[in-house]
């Protein structure tokens, strides 16, 4: 679609989009816990939750009720304010990051004629904003671990600091090569760049793999979930949390998983363009769902790594690869022009 | 109107947060308010239309303050107040106050004289047919400020190499895979250092 | 004693086999090769494939492993030591216990309490017999010592209840007289469980 023919973005459209994102993603983030349990169960030849509601679907509601009604314990020696604020940071930043991410293609609601844009706020530095917000979200685990006066928490937050600081570099560098090709930081431009049907992953396979690995580390998923590695540090930064505060961390984590899925599908996997007979919205949902499934799949299949292996992987393998990839991309772009 | 309100909200909040940073005796409070202040400053950039700088501010300072946190974690018990030693508080207040005054005068004089103007306003690159914040910044960086930019890059490189050398002394040994006993290892390391 | 000897003290002749693992490479080239081979070996994908195959197996080929416990139960081994059963004589239906008191005597946690008296025929009869299941450790000595095979361990392992006393009286443990024909004889030590055949599987190591 040509940019000049787009209808005007009205406040109503943006609000509808914002509500859509909040409602859908919050629901999916909760629903994600159910899907995760089910899929992990199937991969281990178990049934997963199945007694609350049909196919265990209402397990979600039961968990919600449990989390809401649980006593909210704040340890005696903890720093109370910071302890209380930390989970909110995780959840809030995860949703703010989603504001700048295109989840569905733009559409016009038929009868009231309101145009709903693809992104709640299409700032032209979208990618950087999302990455920055996800980075800001890391303050959640960090503060949570430090505020709770518990050695496991401290270890968890120390791991937050090193793991995220390192993998931030890889995420940034890996996504730099596609940015150089497209020449823009806006998600919409990325999507339009791939409108002819060639996905960027064809040109940038290395960057895609690096981004996926770093994405796993940033969303704190197995094989890199060292922050709350049960076998080593009890629960890491969430050791002392209970009830809804604990739940907020998890809503944040699942929202971040979706964000990473969206970025991967928009930047590398062709975005919300129509593909063959499938309309764009179906494609993007399919891609996000697959990347979500992939995260669960990996969790079922692969073991944790040790912290030293994690840092080794980041600085000695991934970062040099990313830099080389950027340099090669630069040279090729220069030659082609 | 919106911008006016937003500016004051951001400005006041930032000032208060930085005040907490300086005044608080608790590491956790001061670090957290520092981080939050930095994030709010990026809000000021967004208000000015400098989206790119705003985001860079966000990313860079989030990382930088996080590094500070890790030092705080190593040096202090985050849940207790730090006991500060005050030697000569009059002198400290005097010098600090003077410096603050100098800064205020420095920054407010051009504003009062009303001859402050942007040399490279936002939207500069539009003359060349490309638009966007990143392009603006790139244009200025690689023309007018090329030398400072390269010098900064060089300095960062030097700092990085120095950091690697400082930290990397014992990196030849993988402690997890080494089969030597602790004493032997210590001896080896001592020999290396000598 | 040197450190090596100290560590090996009281250790019999060792004939452990050391696995032939790759040694940590020392040269830079060796390390590089290790990284490359570890990165590009398809082992990671084998892991992904195995879990995916298991999911397909579980979902579509009916190889779900779960036993949905309260609704379906696995047969338990005859050697299982759960709540005791007092057996009856098959011919007369009289309880087998002769009141010899051996079980009471041998019980290491002193939880069997019994009392006997003479009945009208001047034969010994059991007037009291209880097992305190708060103390019983299910060691099986009582069943082993009983000369009449009167007390055996039964298969009742679901013993959650409001009152422990609901299991522990003589009448509770005694085979109900109308179910005498269903009474299971103790099959003896070494008996195998009824579903032993199905439980034998090839060790799933090969992928
Ligand atoms: S099983 Fe052992 S502890 Fe229990 S009653 Fe028999 S002898 Fe006593
Ligand atoms: S050992 Fe057997 S026969 Fe003797 S008292 Fe106990 S249950 Fe009765």
Image (spheres, coloured by chain):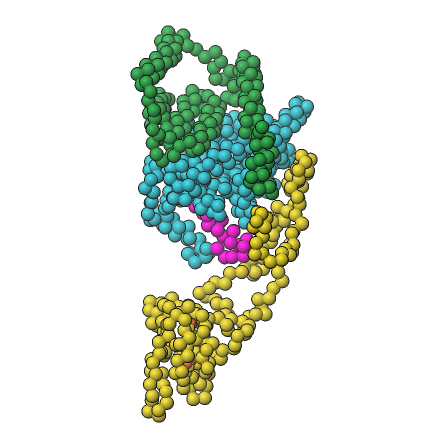
Chain colours: A cyan, B green, C yellow
Q: Is residue A112 magenta?
A: no
**Ligand 2's quadrant:** bottom left
Q: Nearer the viewer, residue A11 or B95?
A: B95
- Which residue is found at the position 65% from the left and 23% from the top? A334
A238, above or below B99, in the image: below
Residue A69 appears in the rendering: yes
Residue A210 appears in the rendering: no
Give percent across and percent down for residue B121: 47, 15
- Which residue is found at the position 47% from the left and 22% from the top? B53
Give percent across and percent down for residue A333: 65, 25
- Which residue is found at the position 50% from the left and 21% from the top? B133
- Which residue is found at the position 38% from the left and 66% from the top? C160
Image-based side of A82 in relation to A234, left or right: left
C190, above or below A201, in the image: below
Q: Which residues are magenta?
A: A23-48
Q: Residue furthest bottom?
A: C121
Secondary structure character of the magenta stretch overall: helix
Q: Nearer the viewer, residue C152 or B185?
A: B185
Q: Quadrant of the C terminus of chain C?
A: bottom right
Q: Nearer the viewer, residue B129 or A92?
A: A92
Q: Residue furthest left?
A: B90
């Amino acid at each position: 679609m040509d940019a000049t023919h787009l209808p005007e973005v009205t406040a109503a459209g943006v609000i509808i989009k914002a509500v859509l994102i909040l409602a859908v993603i919050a629901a999916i983030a909760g629903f994600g816990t159910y899907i995760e349990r089910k899929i992990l169960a199937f991969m281990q030849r178990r049934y997963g939750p199945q007694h609350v509601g049909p196919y265990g679907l209402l397990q979600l509601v039961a968990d919600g009720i449990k989390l809401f009604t649980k006593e909210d314990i704040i340890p005696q020696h903890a720093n109370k304010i910071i302890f209380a604020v930390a989970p909110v940071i995780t959840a809030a930043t995860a949703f703010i990051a989603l504001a700048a991410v295109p989840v569905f293609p733009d559409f016009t609601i038929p009868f009231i004629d309101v145009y709903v844009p693809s992104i709640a706020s299409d700032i032209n530095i979208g990618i950087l904003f999302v990455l920055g917000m996800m980075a800001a979200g890391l303050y959640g685990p960090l503060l949570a671990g430090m505020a709770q006066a518990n050695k496991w928490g401290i270890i968890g937050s120390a791991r937050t600091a090193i793991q995220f600081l390192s993998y931030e570099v890889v995420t940034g560098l890996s996504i730099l090569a596609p940015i150089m090709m497209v020449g823009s930081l806006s998600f919409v431009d990325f999507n339009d760049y791939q409108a002819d049907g060639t996905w960027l992953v064809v040109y940038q396979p290395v960057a895609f793999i690096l981004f996926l690995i770093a994405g796993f580390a940033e969303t704190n998923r197995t094989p890199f979930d060292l922050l709350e590695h049960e076998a080593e540090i009890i629960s890491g930064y969430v050791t002392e949390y209970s009830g809804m505060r604990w739940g907020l961390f998890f809503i944040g984590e699942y929202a971040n998983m979706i964000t990473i899925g969206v970025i991967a599908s928009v930047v590398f996997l062709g975005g919300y363009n129509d593909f063959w007979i499938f309309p764009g919205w179906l494609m993007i949902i399919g891609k996000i769902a697959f990347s979500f499934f992939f995260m669960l799949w990996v969790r079922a299949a692969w073991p944790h790594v040790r912290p030293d292996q994690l840092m080794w992987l980041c600085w000695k393998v991934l970062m040099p690869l990313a830099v080389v990839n950027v340099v090669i991309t630069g040279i090729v772009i220069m030659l082609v022009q | 109107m919106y911008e006016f309100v937003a500016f004051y909200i951001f400005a006041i909040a930032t000032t208060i947060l930085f005040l907490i940073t300086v005044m608080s005796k608790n590491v956790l409070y001061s670090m957290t308010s520092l981080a939050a202040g930095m994030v709010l400053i990026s809000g000021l950039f967004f208000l000015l239309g400098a989206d790119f700088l705003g985001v860079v501010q966000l990313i860079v300072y989030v990382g930088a303050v996080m590094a500070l946190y890790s030092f705080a974690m190593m040096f202090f018990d985050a849940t207790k107040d730090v006991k500060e030693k005050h030697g000569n508080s009059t002198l400290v207040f005097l010098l600090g106050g003077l410096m603050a005054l100098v800064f205020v005068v420095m920054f407010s004089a051009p504003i009062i004289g009303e001859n402050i103007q942007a040399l490279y306003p936002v939207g500069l690159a539009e003359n060349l047919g490309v638009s966007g914040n990143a392009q603006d910044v790139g244009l200025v960086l690689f023309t007018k400020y090329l030398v400072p930019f390269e010098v900064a890059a060089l300095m960062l490189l030097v700092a990085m190499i120095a950091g690697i050398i400082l930290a990397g002394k014992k990196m030849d040994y993988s402690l997890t895979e080494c089969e030597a006993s602790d004493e032997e290892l210590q001896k080896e390391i001592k020999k290396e250092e000598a | 004693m040197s450190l090596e000897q100290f560590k090996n003290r009281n250790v019999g002749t060792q004939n452990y086999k050391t696995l032939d693992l790759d040694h940590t490479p020392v040269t830079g080239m060796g390390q590089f090769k290790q990284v490359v081979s570890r990165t590009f070996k398809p082992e990671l994908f084998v892991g992904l494939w195995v879990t995916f195959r298991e999911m397909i197996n579980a979902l579509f080929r009916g190889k779900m492993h779960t036993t949905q416990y309260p609704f379906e139960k696995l047969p338990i081994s005859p050697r299982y030591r759960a709540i005791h059963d007092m057996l009856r004589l098959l011919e007369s239906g009289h309880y087998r216990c002769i009141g010899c008191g051996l079980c009471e005597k041998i019980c290491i946690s002193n939880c069997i309490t019994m009392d006997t008296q003479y009945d009208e025929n001047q034969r010994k009869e059991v007037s009291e017999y209880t097992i305190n299941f708060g103390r019983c450790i299910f060691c099986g000595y009582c069943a082993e010592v009983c000369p009449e095979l009167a007390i055996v361990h039964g298969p009742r392992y679901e013993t959650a209840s409001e009152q422990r006393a609901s299991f522990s009286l003589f009448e509770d443990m005694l085979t109900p007289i109308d179910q005498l024909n269903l009474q299971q004889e103790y099959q003896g030590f070494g008996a195998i469980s009824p579903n032993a055949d199905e439980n034998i599987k090839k060790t799933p190591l090969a992928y």
